[in-house]
Amino acid sequence: MGLISHFMNHKTLYVHWGFIQMSISNAIIIVLMFGLFLAALLLPFPHEAKRDSGELDQQSAQEAGGAQT
Amino acid sequence: MSNDLHDKNRELWTARLRKSWQKNLPIEKLLPDVQPAYVASWIYTFGVATLASLGVIIFSGLILAFEGPSWYHLSRAGHFVNSLHFWSVQLFFIFMVIHLWGKFWMAAWRGKRLMTWMTGGVAFVASVATAFTGYLVQTNFDSQWISFEAKDGFNSVGIGAWFTVTNLGQQLLLHVAFLPMILGLITVIHVLLVRAKGVVPPIDAFDRGSATTNNSERRNP
């Protein structure tokens, strides 16, 4: 918290890249969003334990590719 | 004229709407408990994360509306709910933009899903407008600064006379009534279209010959 309050209580810093100018805060958010996007693509998704097969509508399951999420 | 055609012409709009709804969005599609295998990926979770954020925004916004500016400016609980409203908006946009990236790169308009894509785009624009009016109704120096900077922009394109960013009453009513209503309506239509058309499969799903959701997808990949 000390670091955040120190960061937020000072004059805004800007990054300059050619004609692009944005605050450090916005740059950090954009980098985090790219990181979250890549993580969503690359990290494996935990599979839910399959329910009893009797509860499933077999036809729907086959049509859907046979997996539950 | 046959009897069938005669009967069809005599149907009320309610009957036509019911039959169309039952044909395109039966209850099994509206409330599914099984999804295609390819949906087991984190990238497919950002749509519902956006909806969850919207739920927190609406709930915290209702509390702010009932308690009023003096409460959310001066009390600790008010500060908390005000911050909850603000940060849930930030998460809403982060999740929505990542959802947009994911859907763009998987060309989510395939398989007769163009309306789903377009309603998502309109929902994004409506969200920007709603968030902008939110910044204008904070009733602090920040909102004063933003409105006085923005008025020149709106005046320069000729709409400042009826969309007056320095008119707090107008902006407050737009923020808490008109724009949420529009955004909510588009969101409901967007979700219903997702249910009706199914979640879009990955682009290479057909090459693998495994992941399809319905017959129209097979015919029109």
Image (spheres, coloured by chain):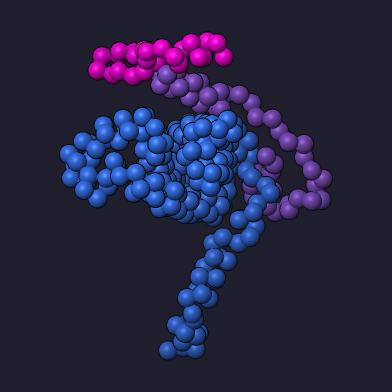
**Residue B73: x and y, percent?**
49, 33
**Residue A32: x and y, percent?**
49, 21
Residue at the spot 58% in from the left edge and 66% down from the top edge: B22
Residue at the spot 69% in from the left edge and 41% down from the top edge: A68
In the rendered view, tell whether residue B46 sits above or below residue A20: below
Tell me the shade of chain B.
blue
Identify the image quadrant of residue A23.
Answer: top left
The segment highlighted magenta reads A1-24
**Residue B97: x and y, percent?**
45, 33
Judging depth in this view, the residue of B183 and B118 nearest the camera is B183
Task: Report the chain shown in purple.
Answer: A
| Residue B138 visible from this viewpoint | yes
Identify the image quadrant of residue B104.
Answer: top left
In the rendered view, tell whether residue B100 sits above or below residue A21: below
Asked if the magenta segment contains residue A13, the reply would be yes
Image position of B219 (left or right of B129): right
**Residue B112: x and y, percent?**
45, 52
Residue at the spot 68% in from the left edge and 52% down from the top edge: A60
Judging depth in this view, the residue of B68 and B20 nearest the camera is B68
Residue at the spot 34% in from the left edge and 49% down from the top edge: B170
